[in-house]
């Protein structure tokens, strides 16, 4: 091993965790086959029907290990103020002591895998190397799909001492021993007692968002919880857009959108660059460029079907791992919302018999597929461009049953930053606890920002200062507004194209808009609303701004902002301006 820093660290972790053997992963086909075989033999994976699902496997997690655990996730910066009011903080010395007790000897009887991986495109100025040490072969095979893994990362690293360290052990999967800890000053992640995606696949949320957001602040770029897509318009021009929605609020679906027939006939086309994470940096021309640092999709299974997202269904046609979905007797899979009638009998995600009469879901609401991004039929030819794609618009959005219109436009970068900072959304099954509760989730980064949220907003404002009038336009969307009966007012999915097309039009200086106290709204005609079978009341509700509701919203934001010692003046100013516009408008 030529890289001394790397070898010394691996030796140190091995001395602490005392594995029976050490395996350096090369990321080869044979290695993965062998690991899959081994897991099938010990019962931790089930091989699916190889004709219907070639190269696909099925896994069930521990019943207490199905989602991210935000109350067990820590940012261990030296000073508490640098983690800020929205993160759990623990003193790094104390967290190290606590973790060292848990990690001591935890790999006895197990193999320790050393996974070299690359986040970003090889040769890209934005690519970064990480290593994950783990005792979980399930983590290895998932990391192989989610990242560019093996030799490619070692080659990129060479003998440089600069890489992100990740130490993971599934421990005994006890919830009370679970810690997802980040040490920004050491470029180190330590994760114990969970095998679930966001807790255990350390390249994803732990590195590419929590640690990367700190690096991005220091180096003048952005690490964001955003999908990236390319939209070709009828003139043949491509516009690239990035969008931040909280977990399980529609990023994968929007990233793979298929335009409705009428739009396709005019020449509209959508291509995917990424579905969860974007790293954005200024290019030589002063514009903001985005890359997807990942290599696969870790997507929500329930609700994914040929009618909602055929591109996701095609992405998982082979070489995919399904976790916590339901298993059919013929070794195929099923989940709620898949096409057709529910099967007469399946084995549910806990391993129990299930029928359509059962009172619990067959697939866990946060069950997931891990699929190679390259298998997506609409993957963009630009998705592995080292320099990334130039972003013309940024979209924020949450899951809001009321108040938030379908779409509106910010009037400046500062106003747009404020729209991101004030995002709220109803909680989903992607994290443990509080399902359906409305909470603030700024820029969809509440669980993922590795430093003080006030400083993060200031960093956004600073980026705007630097980029000037070349910065992307900013929008806020809401696909989830409900009617009196609790029904969705907006059809969503492919029909979200109506909104994307308006945004593209606006980026070109076209597309009709009307001013309102909250920002610019489209007219129904600019959205081609008449092509949808919406009732007149749904159409009105989707684009209305109720002044009394918004006054309450603005007041609540004042209360929310009180916890931030480092609230940027620009954010406070935008809330004052909003209140002023609301108080003077005549409705
Ligand atoms: P993470 O992977 O957790 O970050 O989630 P995500 O943001 O990628 O969410 P995803 O696209 O997987 O969607 C989550 C859930 O929202 C699924 O059950 C979808 O069916 C549903 N969903 C997505 N888009 C829409 C939409 O436009 N309208 C409605 N009503 N539901 C949607
Ligand atoms: C999310 O929860 O936002 C996800 C899944 O994308 S996880 O990788 O578990 O974070
Ligand atoms: Mn996500």
Image (spheres, rainbow, N blue to C red):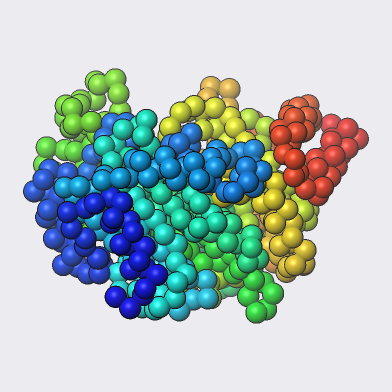
In this rendering, position of residue 197 left or right of residue 428: left
Looking at the image, is 125 positioned above or below residue 109? below
Q: Quick one: 3 or 339, which is closer to the camera? A: 3
In this rendering, position of residue 376 left or right of residue 128: left
Looking at the image, is 404 positioned above or below residue 202? above
Residue 179 screen position, x and y as percent: 41, 40
Residue 226 shows in this picture: no
Residue 7 screen position, x and y as percent: 33, 68
Residue 342 screen position, x and y as percent: 24, 32
The residue lying at 57 percent from left, 48 percent from top is: 77
Looking at the image, is 29 positioned above or below residue 560? below
The residue lying at 77 percent from left, 48 percent from top is: 568
Residue 95 shows in this picture: yes
Quadrant assignment, res 219:
bottom right
The residue lying at 63 percent from left, 46 percent from top is: 79
In this rendering, position of residue 576 left or right of residue 420: right
Q: From the image, which quarter does the N terminus lie in?
A: bottom left
């Amino acid at each position: 091993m030529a890289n001394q820093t790397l070898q010394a660290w691996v030796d140190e972790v091995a001395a602490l965790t005392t594995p029976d053997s050490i395996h350096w992963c090369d990321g080869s086909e044979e290695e993965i086959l062998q690991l899959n075989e081994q897991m099938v033999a010990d019962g931790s994976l089930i091989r699916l029907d190889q004709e219907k699902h070639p190269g696909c496997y099925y896994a069930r997690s521990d019943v207490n290990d199905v989602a991210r655990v935000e109350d067990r996730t820590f940012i261990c910066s030296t000073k508490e103020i640098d983690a800020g009011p929205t993160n759990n903080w623990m003193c790094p010395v104390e967290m190290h002591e606590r973790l060292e007790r848990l990690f001591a000897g935890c790999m006895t009887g197990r193999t320790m895998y050393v996974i070299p991986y690359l986040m970003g495109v090889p040769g890209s100025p934005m690519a970064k190397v990480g290593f994950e040490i783990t005792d979980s072969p399930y983590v290895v095979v998932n990391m192989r799909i989610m990242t560019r893994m093996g030799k490619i990362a070692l080659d990129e690293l060479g003998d440089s001492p600069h890489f992100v360290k990740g130490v993971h052990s599934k421990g005994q999967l006890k919830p009370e021993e679970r810690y997802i800890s980040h040490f920004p000053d050491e470029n180190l992640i330590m994760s114990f007692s969970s095998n679930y995606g966001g807790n255990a696949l350390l390249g994803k949320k732990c590195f590419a968002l929590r640690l990367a957001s700190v690096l991005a602040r220091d180096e003048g770029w952005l690490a964001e919880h955003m999908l990236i897509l390319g939209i070709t318009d009828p003139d043949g021009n491509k516009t690239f857009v990035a969008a931040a929605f909280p977990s399980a609020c529609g990023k994968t679906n929007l990233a793979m959108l298929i335009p409705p027939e009428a739009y396709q006939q005019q020449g509209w086309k959508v291509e995917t660059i990424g579905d969860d994470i974007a790293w954005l940096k200024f290019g030589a021309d002063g514009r903001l460029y985005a890359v997807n640092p990942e290599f696969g999709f870790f997507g929500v299974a329930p609700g994914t079907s040929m009618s909602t997202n055929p591109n996701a269904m095609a992405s998982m046609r082979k070489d995919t791992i399904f976790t916590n979905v339901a298993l059919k007797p013929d070794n195929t899979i099923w989940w709620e919302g898949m096409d057709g009638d529910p099967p007469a009998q399946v084995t549910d995600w806990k391993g129990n018999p299930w029928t359509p009469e059962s009172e619990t879901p067959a697939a866990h609401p946060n069950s997931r597929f891990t699929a190679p991004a390259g298998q997506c039929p609409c993957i963009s030819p630009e998705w592995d461009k080292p320099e990334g794609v130039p972003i013309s618009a940024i979209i924020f959005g949450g899951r809001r049953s009321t108040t938030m219109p379908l779409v509106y436009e910010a009037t400046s970068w500062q106003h747009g930053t404020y729209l991101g900072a004030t995002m709220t959304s109803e909680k989903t099954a992607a994290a443990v606890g509080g399902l359906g509760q409305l909470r603030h989730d700024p820029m969809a980064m509440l669980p993922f920002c590795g430093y003080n949220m006030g400083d993060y907003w200031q960093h956004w404002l600073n980026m705007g200062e630097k980029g000037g009038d070349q910065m992307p336009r900013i929008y806020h969307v809401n696909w989830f507004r409900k009617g009196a009966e609790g029904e969705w007012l907006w059809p969503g999915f492919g029909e979200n194209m109506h909104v994307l097309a308006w945004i593209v039009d606006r980026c070109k200086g076209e597309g009709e808009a009307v001013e309102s106290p909250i920002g610019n709204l489209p007219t129904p005609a600019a959205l081609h609303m008449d092509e949808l079978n919406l009732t007149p009341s749904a159409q009105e509700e989707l684009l209305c701004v109720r002044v009394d509701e918004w006054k309450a919203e603005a007041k609540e934001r004042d209360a929310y902002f009180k916890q931030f010692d480092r609230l940027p003046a620009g954010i406070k100013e935008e809330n004052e301006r909003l209140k002023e516009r609301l108080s003077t408008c005549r409705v």
